[in-house]
Image (cartoon, rainbow, N blue to C red):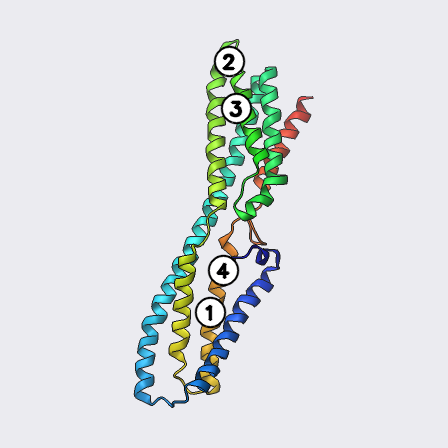
Amino acid sequence: MPLFLYDLPNWLVGLVISGTLVLLSLGGYFLFRRLYQHEFDSEERDIAMSVLGVVATINSLLLAFSAVSVWESFGSAEEALVREADTIGELARDLAVFGSPEATGARVLLLDYAGIVVNSEWEAMRGGEADMTAWTTIDNLFRAVGTIEPDNPRRVALLPEIWARTNELLVHRRDRLHASQAEVPFTLWMVVFVGTVMTMLTMYVLPPTRFNLAMISSIALCMGLVLYFIVAMDHPFAGEESISPEPFQSAIGNMQRWDLESR
């Protein structure tokens, strides 16, 4: 989906997608009736309605599959974000308790990294991209952790935990970036499009009564609403329904509060 759609209000995106599908369906109906001037008898309409049941069922399953797929991707992205923010909080406390100058320097880099993700990388993730400054900062964080030398039993016990949290942070970062790149594949969009067209075409055998036009509009509206849901969830970090950076902001706030209380 074009990213400019995610800059629009939710209600407007839903109105554009659903309204466009309804208008196209009705416009296609009248164009079909104009070009193919044949009055279908009851037997032909009965056959068409039987075919409609099959086609509509298949298309509904495709739409449902797409909706479930984007919802699961959205949930995976949110889960990866929360795990990464939790790991930042745990690592920040481990480094603060360790207490050496090297650990303090690593903690400063960790705070910088969280700030870069919120203030810079968040915008890049709208298009499924990463911020190279964030990668550089996390590389420097690994180098800083590598300089930490334990000099007493307490610090010897803490260092493996610090390394474990640092490695977890990298894993969760990769999971978050991978989730930001997830989207409905073009092939699936095309299959859904063809299925929707076939569903509407099958209904064009109905005579142009108000009731039949209302039924065509209702089916088109239902499909449009499902398509709107798929579009809204397709990019987890874009649009009004996007994932909030609140877990990262909370981790940053806790680190700053710890520093303030320590001073």
Q: Is 246 in front, or is 60?
A: 60
Mark 4 to mark 3: distance in Å?
40 Å
Type of the residue with mark 2: Arg
Q: Earlier in the sequence, mark 3 or mark 1?
A: 3
Q: Is residue 8 left or right of residue 84?
A: right
Q: According to the image, label 2 marks what residue? A: 154
Disc 3 element: helix
Picture layout, residue 255 above or below residue 68: above
Q: Tell me where residue 195 sits by quadrant.
A: bottom left
Q: Is 88 in front, or is 33?
A: 33
Picture layout, residue 102 above or below residue 31: above
Q: According to the image, label 1 marks what residue? A: 222
Type of the residue with mark 1: Cys
Q: Decide: marks 4, 2 in contact (CB < 8 A)? A: no
Q: What's the mark number on residue 142? A: 3
Q: Is 69 in front, or is 30?
A: 30
Picture layout, residue 188 above or below residue 16: above
Mark 2 to mark 1: distance in Å?
62 Å
Type of the residue with mark 4: Phe
Binning the other alpha carbons within 10 Å of mark 2 as few (below 14), some (14 to 19) or many (20 upward) gives few
Q: Tell me where residue 97 sits by quadrant.
A: top right
Mark 4 to mark 2: distance in Å?
52 Å
Disc 4 element: helix
Q: Earlier in the sequence, mark 1 or mark 4?
A: 1
On the rendered image, what quadrant is the C terminus found in?
A: top right
Q: Is residue 243 visible?
A: no
Q: Earlier in the sequence, mark 4 or mark 3?
A: 3
Q: According to the image, label 4 marks what residue? A: 229
Q: Is residue 221 visible?
A: yes
User: What residue is shown at x 49% (from left), y 54% (from top)?
Assistant: 234
Q: Tell me where residue 99 sits by quadrant.
A: top right
Type of the residue with mark 3: Phe
